[in-house]
Image: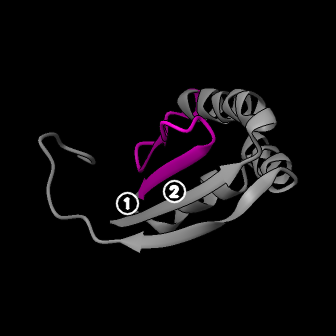
Amino acid sequence: MKVIKVTYTVEATFAKKNQENIQAFINDLQQLNHSGLRYHIYMAADGKTFFHFAEYNNDNAQKTLLELPSFISFQQQRDQHLESEPTIEPMQFVDATYTIFN
């Protein structure tokens, strides 16, 4: 399993639009219902720093996300309103209270 954490901060005036763009690509991911892809996002108390966690069980699952038009649009718009560049961290899964992939 591959796990990626992305952290970034957007301009405060763009934070709401960023959340809308996130919702758009999450809706599309839910429609796809890809069994090898899990994605979740958190927002810090400052209201403009976001933490994205992507979990993939294979390279095809990652490709599905990276080629999704709504995800590409989200990234392009986000990149025009950054206060800090995204930090991309590969992570090692240890354990969970639930099954991530069957």
76 relative to 24, above or below: below
Q: Do the residues labelled 2 and 1 touch (CB within 8 Å)?
A: yes
39 relative to 17, above or below: below
Q: Position of residue 93 (x, y in %)?
A: 25, 64
65 relative to 46, above or below: below
95 or 63: nearer the viewer? 95
Residue 66 occupies quadrant = bottom right
Q: Residue furthest front?
A: 46
| Left or right of 93, for residue 51 | right
Disc 2 on helix, strand or loop?
helix
Label 2 is placed on what type of residue?
A: Ala
Q: Give the range drawn in magenta.
A: 31-55
Residue 91 occupies quadrant = bottom left
Say few, some or many: other residues with alpha carbon within 10 Å of mark 1 (under 14 / 14 to 19 / 20 or more): some
Residue name at image x 62 percent, y 52 percent? 65
Label 1 is placed on what type of residue?
A: Asn
Residue identified by numbered label 1: 57
Q: Position of residue 39 (x, y in %)?
A: 47, 44
Residue 38, magenta (yes or no): yes
Residue name at image x 46 percent, y 54 percent? 54
Q: Position of residue 75 (x, y in %)?
A: 76, 52
Residue name at image x 72 percent, y 48 percent? 10
Residue identified by numbered label 2: 61
Residue 46, magenta (yes or no): yes
